[in-house]
């Protein structure tokens, strides 16, 4: 299955994502600090990054840009509690494949992760 990182400034959100996707057979590494997630991506192959748009030091969109520099093939799903067309457009223009609205819905997350991972195999 896939190697996934989840980055959210709220620990409970990363724990939830980890539980949901681990049950699906994925390897999930969770982070609440941008620097830790970026360092992990530099030294490990990541298939998918799930990033909250609002983080502590930088935005999820900024982290996405850094991760795409590390590995342009990496897939990404953005999380937001404040969905706007501008945010979605910006995230997708930087290479996000999907976005999910918080609070996280298990079925929606599973569906979007499966869809995004299928794209990477084409």
Image (cartoon, grey):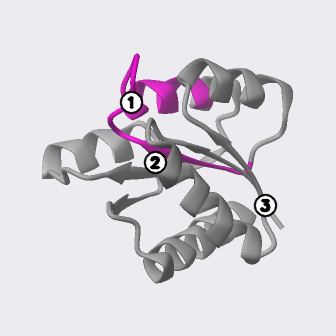
Residue 45 in the image: state x and y as whole percent: 83, 40
- Within 10 Å of disc 2 (Cα), the crowding (few <14, some 14-19, many 20+) is many
Label number found at residue 55: 1
Q: Position of residue 19 (x, y in %)?
A: 66, 66
Instruction: Name the residue tied to disc 2.
Output: 96
Q: Could you say where residue 114 lies in the image, as x and y percent from the top left?
A: 62, 75
Q: Would you call the spot at circle 1 few (<14 residues within 10 Å), some (14-19), or many (20 or more)? A: some
Q: Residue at x 58, y 65 (%)?
A: 116
Residue 77: in magenta span: no
Q: Quadrant of the C terminus?
A: bottom right
Residue 2, labelled with which disc?
Answer: 3
Mark sitting on residue 82: none
* Residue occupying the point 65% across, 29% down: 37
Residue 105, by quadrant, is: bottom left
Residue 42, quarter of picture: top right
Is disc 3 surrounded by few (<14), some (14 to 19) or many (20+) residues within 10 Å? some
Foreground disc of the pair 3, 2: 3
Image quadrant where one finds the N terminus: bottom right
Alpha carbon distance from label 1 to label 2: 16 Å
Q: Is residue 122 visible?
A: no
Residue at x 15%, y 52% (from the top left corner): 85
Is label 1 or label 2 in front? 1
Q: Residue at coordinates 66% horizontally, 59% vertically from top-left?
A: 18
The secondary element bearing badge 3 is classed as loop
- Local SS, label 2: loop
Mark closer to the observer (3, 1): 1
Q: Magenta region: which residues?
A: 47-67
């Amino acid at each position: 299955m896939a190697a996934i990182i989840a980055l959210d400034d709220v620990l409970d959100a990363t724990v939830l994502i980890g539980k949901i996707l681990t049950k699906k057979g994925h390897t999930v590494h969770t982070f609440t600090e941008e620097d830790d997630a970026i360092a992990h991506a530099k030294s490990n192959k990541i298939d998918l990054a799930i990033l909250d748009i609002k983080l502590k030091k930088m935005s999820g969109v900024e982290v996405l840009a850094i991760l795409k520099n590390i590995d342009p093939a990496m897939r990404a799903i953005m999380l937001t509690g404040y969905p706007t067309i501008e945010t979605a457009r910006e995230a997708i223009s930087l290479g996000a494949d999907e976005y999910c609205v918080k609070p996280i819905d298990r079925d929606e997350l599973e569906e979007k992760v499966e869809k995004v991972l299928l794209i990477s195999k084409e």
